[in-house]
Amino acid sequence: MRKPSGVLRFLALVFALVSTWIFIRSYISLNAKTIRLPRWLSEWDKDVDTAKCGLAKPCPKEFFAFKISSGAANVVGPTMCFENQVIMSPVKNNVGRGLNIALVNGTTGMVLTQKCFDMYSGEVKLLVKFLKEIPEGALVLVASYDDPGTRLNDETRKLLSSLGSSYAKQLGFRDSWVFLGAKDLKDKSPFEQFLKNNPDTNKYEGWPELLELEGCVPRKIP
C-alpha cells in the first residue's frame, strides 16, 4: 500500500494544529466570560461589604451611617449604632427604662456620652440638666424603652422639640419613640418615628411594637 505523501502529512498536521488552537481559544474565552462579574454586581457586592450599621447600602461621602431601635415592651432594651459602633445595647448593659440618649460630635463622629433617664419613677431634673448642657453641633440619638413619657414636663418637651422633634410634645406612657436630632437644628428633623400606646393596636400586651430608624445623616462642616 502506498504511504501518504509528505504533503498530505503536512496538511493533516496543520489542520490538527489549527483545530486545537480554535478549541483552546474558545475554551479560554468561555471561562473568562464565566468568571467575570458584571460591573453592577461587583459594585453591589462592594457596597454590602462596606455598609455600616447593617444598612443596605453605604452612606455617601460626608455622611454618617446610623441605626436606632427602640425597646420591645419592657423585655428587650434599645440599640443604637453610629458609624458601625454600637453605642448602647442590652449586650453592653448600658440601657435602661425611659429615654436612652447618646450624643455624637456632628463633625468628627466621635461619641461624646450616653445616658439613660428613668421617666417612670426617676428625677426629671436630671434630664433637664443633661439636655441644657448638650454642646453646639452635637447629634442627639434617642430611643425609648418601656415608659418614656410619664415624668416628662413642659420644660423637657420644649427642650426635646428644640432638637428637631415633632413628637416630643405628645410623648406619653409606654409610647415607642426613636429620634435623631441636633443641638443647633433650625428645622424639624426628618429622622423620627413615633407610635402611640393604644390597646386596640398594640403589638405587645400593654405596649406598641418596637420601632427602627436608620439612614445617613450629613456631617456638620465646621
Image (cartoon, grey):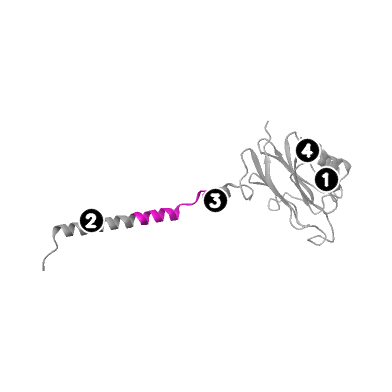
- Three-letter amino acid code at the position of disc 2: Val
Image quadrant where residue 103 sits: top right
Which numbered marker is on residue 187? 4
Label 3 and label 4: CA atoms lie apart by 36 Å
Q: Mark 1 points at which residue?
A: 168
Q: Which of the marked residues, 1 or 3, is nearer the chain's N terminus?
A: 3
Q: Mark 3 points at which residue?
A: 45
Q: In this view, does 201 lie above or below 65?
A: below
Judged by its main secondary structure, the magenta piece is helix
Label 1 and label 3: CA atoms lie apart by 40 Å
Residue 79 visible in this rendered orientation of the protein: no
Disc 1 to disc 2: CB gap under 8 Å: no
Question: Which element carries disc 3, helix, strand or loop?
Answer: helix
What stretch of residues is rendered in magenta? Answer: 25-45
Label 4 and label 1: CA atoms lie apart by 14 Å
Question: Which element carries disc 1, helix, strand or loop?
Answer: helix
Whole-percent x, y for residue 165 in the image: 79, 43
Q: Which of the marked residues, 2 or 4, is nearer the chain's N terminus?
A: 2
